[in-house]
């Protein structure tokens, strides 16, 4: 059985076009500048516009509430592009499974489809496998979110199953990630 994975301090990760960094209060203003189109928030598996516990949350209230410190065993980054926050990324260690779980989202609609999601995903995978030493990284994505599924497949993740409510479980193993980074496509029916 592998040793326990520990995240250590939140580190800044720099890509060619994006930076994963600590969240700032100004990120809320950036988020409010790029409202989510009706129905699009359904791609993320939750809807911050809907009612929870019988009351409606104001977007600023909801964003500020989620802006506190990360849970123990997890990192939450703001994704910065050209000096402003355009999304978020996260990594949570499942200590029982010895496996980090990846999350990400680009909320600026005009920036989707430009490869930023792939760059963010690769930065998070590098953090998980390189610094953390994880052999496997997994995530869940809604079956209807074809853009995210394509992004994850392009980064070497493969579909492993489907959970209730049409969540697709995807994962990448360390050797597969190395092969993908060398430019060799994965074999099998899930190749991108």
Image: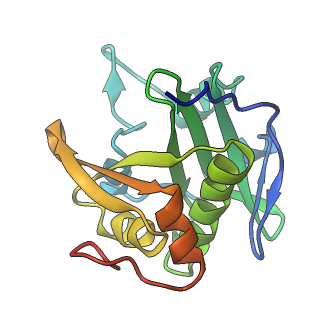
Q: How is the image coloured?
A: rainbow
Residue 70 is situated, as x and y percent measured from the top left of the image, at 67, 26
Q: Residue at x 26, y 72 (%)?
A: 190
Q: Residue at x 63, y 30 (%)?
A: 5
As drawn, the residue found furthest toward the top would be 53
Q: Taking 84 as reference, is 97 above or below it?
A: above
Quadrant in which residue 108 is drawn: bottom right
Q: Is residue 147 left or right of residue 91?
A: left
Residue 68 is situated, as x and y percent measured from the top left of the image, at 70, 24
Q: Is residue 110 visible?
A: no
Q: Taking 51 as reference, is 157 above or below it?
A: below
Q: Residue at x 78, y 30 (%)?
A: 8
Quadrant in which residue 146 is drawn: bottom left
As drawn, the residue found furthest toward the front would be 1
Q: Residue at x 39, y 53 (%)?
A: 171
Q: Is residue 161 left or right of residue 1?
A: left
Q: Is residue 96 left or right of residue 133?
A: left
Frontmost residue, 12 versus 191:
191
Frontmost residue, 79 versus 12:
12
Quadrant in which residue 182 is drawn: bottom right
> Image quadrant for the C terminus?
bottom left
């Amino acid at each position: 059985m592998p040793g326990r994975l520990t995240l250590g301090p939140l580190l800044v990760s720099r890509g060619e076009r994006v930076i994963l960094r600590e969240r700032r209060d100004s990120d809320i203003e950036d988020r409010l500048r790029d409202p989510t189109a009706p129905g699009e928030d359904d791609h993320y598996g939750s809807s911050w516009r809907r009612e929870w516990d019988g009351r409606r949350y104001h977007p600023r209230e909801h964003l500020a509430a989620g802006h506190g410190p990360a849970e123990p065993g997890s990192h939450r980054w703001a994704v910065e592009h050209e000096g402003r926050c355009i999304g978020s990324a996260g990594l949570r260690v499942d200590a029982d499974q010895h496996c980090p779980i990846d999350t990400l989202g680009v909320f600026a609609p005009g920036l989707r489809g430009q490869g930023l999601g792939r760059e963010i995903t690769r930065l998070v995978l590098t953090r998980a496998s390189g610094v953390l030493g994880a052999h496997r990284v997994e995530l869940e994505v809604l079956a209807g979110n074809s853009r995210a599924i394509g992004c994850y497949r392009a980064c070497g993740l493969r579909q492993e199953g489907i959970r209730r409510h049409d969540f697709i479980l995807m994962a990448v193993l360390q050797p597969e990630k190395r092969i993908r980074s060398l430019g060799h496509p994965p074999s099998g029916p899930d190749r991108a």
